[in-house]
Image (cartoon, rainbow, N blue to C red):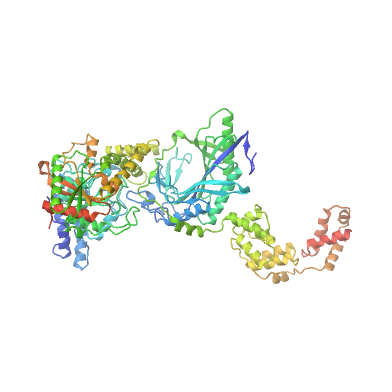
């Protein structure tokens, strides 16, 4: 069935393009001064523009444009002079009965995003538009049809969005997940959005079609209501199989919008092409064309931080680990890679630093509470054989608890002195005497029996013995 | 020719304490009392509010404050200009009960200049019409002959000045809605350069064409009022970010040395009396030292067609917000779509519905290029033709309206005949240039004729110089 590299079903491949909407982390709305804030009481962040009152006029938010430019530049897009258009349709939570969006001249075009294994997904465009209000339907099914009434919160109306439209370059559910995860990491890194799917600040729609490899694209269906990265994989897998089954039965795929039902694990028809709105796009006469100009574009470009892919590559190089390893991915995702690099520069062993940060700092932010120099000193002791890995972990726990400290003093306080060989020999003698069966098995070549002997030594030494040294003594005794 | 006191002389005498604002406003309210039932210029007379504002003006003057260039001047506002807490209806049932939570920028600016608002004037519903017969609240009558229309759509504002109900008034001009009623009522009416006056708080008909402008007894008052309200407003993205030129010096400049164009391929259809008045205007200007030059503007004749695609297209989108969800009237129905249809079906009058349908059609998939797209090309062509003409002339002179005031009902059954009223005024809106109507000569039943003066963008100083010259030669300058 499916892994990252392949997805085929009865000789068909899937062709998927994603439309990702992200709410920008601006102070205020796209065209008015109301706060852009999630979670406030309903209808408190509103104004005549947000409500579409007669006579109100939009004024473009500079910060929103700048964040949208950051997104475009981070996705390798061309940033160009652009215009705003009206997308006309009636819906109660759409105050003006049109959405101000971008149509034939979007801000960002022709970019790309690289996912694992060097696969490049094209980005057709990333344009600015405003969000709608939010409807809550009371009674009935919870959908607008059949409900007893609807409440509308206009706090979200006019919140700036960037819609990022990929090219239909995705061929497997795993690629779709990787694309969204990577995109989210970039958006967070550049400060454009908190990109939380569960809060709706990042929303993903999938255009799915199937074809036999090499054939023309098939008819696509748009899948909505995908609320997590995991659902995205499930939804497009389901949808592609549905389409293959229809074609195999000799039927024709109808272009339509479909709703993913997480509980049922399937998609349902939301509206067919015949029911689709004619949006009657035309240039918004209330706004003037926006030309960012080279100077602004270059300034924004120069201020872009290091992106996640570059961070992973740097960390892999510093630590000598594979760029696609879990530790690299986790630490970069937590944005603790700067810290790892800083510790490694001071000293110690970069590989061990990575392991400790990944394991001990899962609850910590991008700037862990342990000073880099302290962790470097600790790891230097570990790598130099002064501490066992168990002792190192214990001391790291102490460092976290105390927000730093001198590892040498802390090791002394805990009595973590390195044992000399004669002391260890004594513990080994005791272990063999205590468990002659295990010793016999070990000598007969049963490697598992060694664990019991080492356990005795550890217990007797209250964990202070170095496991590696104990193993070496046992092996030498066996002869 | 009206015989009422000019705004300049009112402001001068109020400012010096020679007369009180309360007395001035009371005189105007008395005239309203006397004739408003017959004329029906107003949707709402602000009787008490006006007297209170006047009292405040008098108090400030008594306290030695500088009140401003419009101190105590009674002004009427077209009822599509938002006034905080005061009903603003657009002469439509669909805005029933709505009170804007804010003032239009022009309203605040005039209030800051000391103006006193005496009422909200009648208009063709949403400014769509040329006779004020399309008002949901009944027509306004021409004060000069109450069996005839005042023109439109700003018929109430034109009538208010002509009847002496206010010393000045504000209208809006999308295709001639200030200049045509000014011509029919024998007053001065100006459509400024697009972007010279903020549209914030003007309830939109067609946003790329709408401009607010003055109605006054004479040219000098129009210059004064325009200077008070023009100038950049950051709340309107289409507002010109430059200072508006001073007009007062232009009034006595004369026309010596100016090159004034006669458009030889102007669309025919003007009444003989109107043509004769315009011919006489050219003679007068030539006598005063202007050079009269024949020019051609081939695209002029396509203006009407292009306008009746662009204006309805924008209107269909601008008026979509009247959906019964957030403000104005709502007709309850079983579901949301039925509620929309019932609300809009009952709330809008027939001309508004006709234009919404025209505009929706012009923007529809498959028709956009043939209609809206082509109209935009005509608009560009029009701009080029005017630019070419302005290489050889400084201003142009044409009729403002093809006829003098016409009897009620004479064009209501034939929308095209009504649309032709705007043949000479529409091109200035399409290209954003200023134009004004100044009373000059008379036609049938001694009713006034308006001569239109046109100038390039921000060419108001030249335009006012020409208009002032015509006014002087017609003997119409006020004290």
Q: Is residue A341 left or right of residue B38?
A: right
Q: Quadrant of residue A321?
A: bottom right
Across and down, in percent, residue B338 comes to 37, 36
Tell me what residue is drawn at x 25 percent, y 40 percent.
Answer: B301
* Residue B377 visible at all: yes
The one of B211 and A303 positioned closer to us in this rendering: A303
Q: Quadrant of residue B402?
A: top left
- Examine the rendered structure and indicate whether residue A347 appears above or below residue A226: below
- Examine the rendered structure and indicate whether residue A343 appears above or below residue B105: below
Across and down, in percent, residue B345 comes to 32, 37
The one of B362 and B153 positioned closer to us in this rendering: B362
The one of A329 and B271 positioned closer to us in this rendering: B271
Across and down, in percent, residue B84 comes to 29, 54
- Examine the rendered structure and indicate whether residue B172 appears above or below residue B71: above
Number of dots carrying numbers:
0
Q: Quadrant of residue A403?
A: bottom right
Q: Is residue B128 left or right of residue A213?
A: left
* Residue B331 visible at all: no
* Image quadrant occupied by the C terminus of chain A: bottom right
* Image quadrant occupied by the N terminus of chain A: top right
Across and down, in percent, residue A341 comes to 63, 62
């Amino acid at each position: 069935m499916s892994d990252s590299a392949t997805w085929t079903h009865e000789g068909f491949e899937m062709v998927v393009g994603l439309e990702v909407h992200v709410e920008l982390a601006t102070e205020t709305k796209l065209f008015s001064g109301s706060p852009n804030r999630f979670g406030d009481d309903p209808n408190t962040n509103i104004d005549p523009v947000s409500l579409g009152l007669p006579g109100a006029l939009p004024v473009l938010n500079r910060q929103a444009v700048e964040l949208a430019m950051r997104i475009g530049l981070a996705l390798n897009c061309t940033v160009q002079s652009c215009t705003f258009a009206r997308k006309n349709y009636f819906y109660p939570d759409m105050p003006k009965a049109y959405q101000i969006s971008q149509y034939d001249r979007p801000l960002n075009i022709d970019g790309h995003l690289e996912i694992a294994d060097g696969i490049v997904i094209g980005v057709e465009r990333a344009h600015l538009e405003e969000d709608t209000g939010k409807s809550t339907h009371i009674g009935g099914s919870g959908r607008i049809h059949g409900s007893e009434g609807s409440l509308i919160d206009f706090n979200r109306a006019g919140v700036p969005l960037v819609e990022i439209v990929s090219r239909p370059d995705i061929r497997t559910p795993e690629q779709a997940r990787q694309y969204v995860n990577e995109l989210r990491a970039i958006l967070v890194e550049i400060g454009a959005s908190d990109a939380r799917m569960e809060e709706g600040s990042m929303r993903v729609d999938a255009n799915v079609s199937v074809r036999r490899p090499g054939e023309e694209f098939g008819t696509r269906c748009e899948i909505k209501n995908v609320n997590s990265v995991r659902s995205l994989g499930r939804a497009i897998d389901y949808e592609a199989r549905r389409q293959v089954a229809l074609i195999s039965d000799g039927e024709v795929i109808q272009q339509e919008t479909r709703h993913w039902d997480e509980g049922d694990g399937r998609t349902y028809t939301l509206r067919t092409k015949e029911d689709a709105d004619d949006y009657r796009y035309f240039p918004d006469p209330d706004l003037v064309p926006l030309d960012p100009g080279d100077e602004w574009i270059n300034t924004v470009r120069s201020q872009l931080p290091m992106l996640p892919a570059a961070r992973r590559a740097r960390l892999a190089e510093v630590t000598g680990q594979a760029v696609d390893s879990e530790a690299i991915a986790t630490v970069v995702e937590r944005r603790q890679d700067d810290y790892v690099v800083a510790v490694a520069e001071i000293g110690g062993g970069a590989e061990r630093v990575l392991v400790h940060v990944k394991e001990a700092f899962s609850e910590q932010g991008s700037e862990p509470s342990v000073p880099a120099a302290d962790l470097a000193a600790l790891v230097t002791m570990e790598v130099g054989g002064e501490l066992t890995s168990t002792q190192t972990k214990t001391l790291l726990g102490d460092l976290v608890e105390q927000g730093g400290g001198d590892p040498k003093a802390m090791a002394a306080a805990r009595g973590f002195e390195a044992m000399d060989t004669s002391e260890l020999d004594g513990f080994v003698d005791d272990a063999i005497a205590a468990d002659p069966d295990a010793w016999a098995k070990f000598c007969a070549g049963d490697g598992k029996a060694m664990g019991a002997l080492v356990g005795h030594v550890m217990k007797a030494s209250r964990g202070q013995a170095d496991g590696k040294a104990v193993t070496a003594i046992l092996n030498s005794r066996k002869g | 020719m009206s015989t009422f006191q000019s705004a300049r002389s009112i402001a001068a005498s109020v400012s010096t304490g020679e007369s009180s604002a309360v007395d001035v406003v009371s005189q105007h309210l008395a005239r309203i009392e006397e004739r408003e039932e017959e004329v029906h210029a107003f949707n709402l007379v602000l009787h008490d509010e006006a007297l209170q504002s006047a009292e405040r003006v008098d108090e400030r003057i008594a306290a030695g404050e500088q009140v401003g260039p419009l101190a105590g001047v009674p002004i009427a506002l077209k009822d599509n200009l938002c006034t905080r807490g005061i009903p603003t209806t657009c002469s439509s049932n669909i805005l029933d009960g709505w009170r804007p939570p804010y003032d239009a920028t022009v309203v605040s600016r005039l209030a800051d200049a000391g103006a006193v608002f005496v009422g909200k004037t009648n208009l063709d519903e949403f400014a769509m019409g040329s006779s004020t017969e399309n008002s949901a609240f009944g027509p306004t009558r021409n004060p000069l002959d109450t069996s005839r229309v005042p023109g439109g759509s700003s018929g109430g504002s034109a009538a208010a000045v002509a009847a002496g109900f206010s010393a000045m008034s504000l209208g809006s001009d999308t295709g001639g809605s200030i200049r045509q009623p000014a011509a029919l009522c024998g007053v001065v009416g100006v459509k400024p350069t697009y972007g010279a006056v903020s549209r914030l708080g003007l309830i939109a008909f067609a946003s790329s064409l709408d401009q607010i402008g003055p109605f006054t007894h004479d040219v000098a008052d129009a210059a004064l009022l325009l200077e008070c309200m023009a100038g950049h407003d950051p709340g309107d993205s289409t507002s010109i970010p430059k200072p508006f030129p001073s007009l007062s010096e232009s009034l006595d400049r004369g026309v010596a040395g100016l090159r004034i164009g006669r458009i030889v391929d102007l669309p025919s259809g003007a009444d003989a009396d109107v043509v004769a008045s315009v011919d006489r205007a050219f003679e007068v200007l030539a006598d005063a030292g202007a050079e009269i030059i024949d020019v051609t503007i081939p695209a002029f004749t396509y203006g009407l067609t292009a306008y009746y695609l662009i204006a309805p297209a924008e209107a269909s989108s601008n008026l979509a917000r009247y959906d019964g969800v957030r403000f104005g009237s709502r007709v309850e129905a079983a579901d949301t779509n039925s509620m929309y249809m019932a609300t809009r079906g009952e709330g809008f009058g027939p001309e508004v519905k006709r234009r919404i349908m025209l505009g929706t059609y012009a923007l529809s998939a498959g028709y956009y290029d043939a209609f809206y797209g082509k109209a935009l090309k005509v608009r560009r062509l029009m701009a080029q033709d005017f630019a070419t003409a302005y290489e050889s002339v400084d201003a142009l002179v044409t009729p403002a309206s093809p006829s003098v005031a016409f009897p009620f009902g004479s064009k209501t059954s034939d929308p095209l005949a009504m649309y032709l009223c705007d043949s000479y005024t529409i091109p200035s809106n399409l290209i954003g240039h200023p134009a004004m109507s100044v009373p000059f000569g008379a036609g049938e039943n001694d009713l006034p004729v308006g001569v239109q003066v046109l100038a390039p963008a921000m060419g108001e100083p030249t335009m006012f110089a020409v208009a002032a010259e015509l006014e002087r030669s017609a003997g119409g300058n006020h004290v």
